[in-house]
Amino acid sequence: QGPEELISKEDKAVIKIQSWWRGTLVRRTLLHAALRAWVIQCWWRLMQAKFAEKRRRVTLDKFSREEWAAVRLQSWARMWRIRQRYCQVLNAVRIIQAYWRCHTCASRGLIKGQYRVTASQLHLELEILLGSGPCVVTECIPLPIKQ
């Protein structure tokens, strides 16, 4: 007789129940371990996503600051060039105006004058300088005074 024949039917049923129970415990333990591993993996993926988002945000902020600095520099350079051009044009305008005024004075003449006010009259003396020669005008204008 072999060792299997010595075991009774009742003992075989007990052994079968015990092996089933041990298998259930092992499966339950494996299931809990798998669930814990899954929770840890989910948490780790979430942390990785947060880190990636933070890196993306920092990179975007840095890029934005650098781009803003470049725009400011370009703006200042354009402003400087335009100001230089404006100053050149303004200088040219001043030179043209000075020559024009000088030409106008020489062609139209110059008027000098002085006046004196007394109690009843306004004495006015004008000297007009033209290209041909000076012309002096003297006037005495009576002032309307109410008495």
Image (cartoon, rainbow, N blue to C red):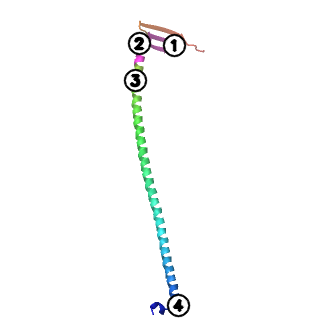
Q: Position of residue 78 (x, y in %)?
A: 41, 35
Pointer 2 residue: 106
Say what secondary structure mark 3 lies in: helix
Disc 3 target residue: 92
**Which of 137 and 52 lies nearest the eye of the viewer?**
52
Q: Secondary structure at mark 1?
A: strand
Q: Is residue 110 depicted above or below 74 in this figure?
A: above
**What secondary structure is found at the residue carrying circle 2?**
helix
Residue type at mark 2: give it: Ala
- Tag 4–tag 3 contact (CB < 8 Å): no
Q: Was residue 62 drawn as part of the magenta stretch in this picture?
A: no
| In the image, residue 42 above or below residue 110 | below
Sequence-first disc among 2 and 1:
2
Q: Nearer the viewer, mark 4 or mark 3?
A: 4
First of labels 4, 3 by sequence position: 4
Name the N-terminal-most of marks 3 and 1: 3
Residue range corresponding to the magenta coloring: 99-128
Secondary structure of the residue carrying tag 4 is: helix
Query: Could you tell me which residue is drawn at 46 percent across and 70 percent down?
Result: 37
Does the segment drawn in magenta span residue 114?
A: yes
- What label does residue 66 carry, if any? none
N-terminal of the pair, mark 2 or mark 4, is: 4
* Label 3 environment density (alpha carbons within 10 Å; few <14, some 14–19, many ≥20): few
Q: CA distance from mark 2 to mark 4?
A: 143 Å
Name the one closer to the observer, 8 or 127: 8
Query: Circle 4 is placed at which residue position?
Result: 9
State the mark number for residue 122.
1
